[in-house]
Image (cartoon, helix red, strand yellow):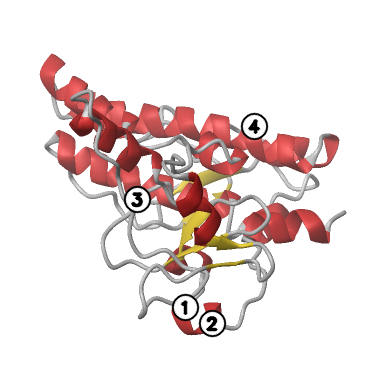
Amino acid sequence: MEGTPHPVSRTPEEVFNDFKGRRAGLVKALTTDVDKFYQMCDPDKENLCLYGLPNETWEVNLPVEEVPPELPEPALGINFARDGMQEKDWLSLVAVHSDSWLLAVAFYFGARFGFGKAERKRLFQMINDLPTVFEVVTGNVKQPKDNSGAQNNSSKSKSSGKTSRQSESQPKGVKMSPPPKEENESGGEEEEEEDEQGATLCGACGDNYANDEFWICCDICERWFHGKCVKITPAKAEHIKQYKCPSCSNKRARV
């Protein structure tokens, strides 16, 4: 269900921006806002759906009544299964259906705006470069490759639970840039760099590293996150002895 009319999209890039906004909202619902999402999916209520909105927000609401709807609708009645299975399995199932819905909406726009074969291919390639909602929720997003055992040992302090400084001005427990890349003597340096850049992703939003961004690593699952995605600032990170991401904190709280 849309709070405001969706923006008119005419190119694959515009449709992809709509996709990214909706995807970001769904990822928030199933990770950083998971407690709120869980409470809203009351099995005693009517059939509910999880909607990702273009402005990177989400909502749980009843499906639209019009048939056919203006846009494809998400999976119906996700709240009914909430208490009938393990929470992580339920969240994973909702994530899978959310991925299907995102693709349906994107290619609905593609058909609506007359995309040809080349435009549909470009749209799918942009979408496929991002990890799925399911991969983010289940923690299956690829992590940075270990290029140097010495570097890996020095980058994380087991005693303090915080990463070491990568530079004199950089706070502990954060990562400001992708790990240094080693040259590939066999001539595959460029391919290796592309692989590593694609593998270094935020565990919350799934986006790649960007220069001068604040990052923090969870000491439990060892996934990296944008500070803004998990609401941690560099100043706050200085006083954290052991950082636990929202997913790990929620799991431990319910044990």
Q: Mark number for residue 93?
A: 4
Disc 2 packing (10 Å; few <14; some 14–19; many ≥20): few
- The numbered mark at residue 21 is 3
Circle 4: residue type: Leu
Which quarter of the figure is the C terminus placed in?
bottom right
Between the residue at mark 4 and the residue at mark 3, the CA separation in whole angstroms equals 21 Å
Earlier sequence position, callout 4 versus callout 3 = 3
Tell whether label 2 touches label 3 (CB within 8 Å): no
Q: For residue 233, which numbered disc appears in the image?
A: 1
On screen, residue 163 above or below 171: above
Q: Are marks 1 and 2 in contact (CB under 8 Å)?
A: yes
Q: Nearer the viewer, residue 27 or 103?
A: 27
Q: Which element carries disc 3, helix, strand or loop? A: helix
User: x and y percent of residue 249 in the render?
Assistant: 72, 61
Callout 4 crowding tier (Cα within 10 Å): few <14, some 14–19, many ≥20: some
Q: Amino acid at mark 2?
A: Lys
| Amino acid residing under circle 1 | Thr
Instruction: Determine crowd level at label 3: few under 14, some 14-19, many 20+ residues with C-alpha closer than 10 A.
Output: some
| Residue picked out by circle 2 | 236
Toward which corner of the image does residue 39 lie, by quadrant? bottom right
* Residue 104, image x, y percentages: 38, 27
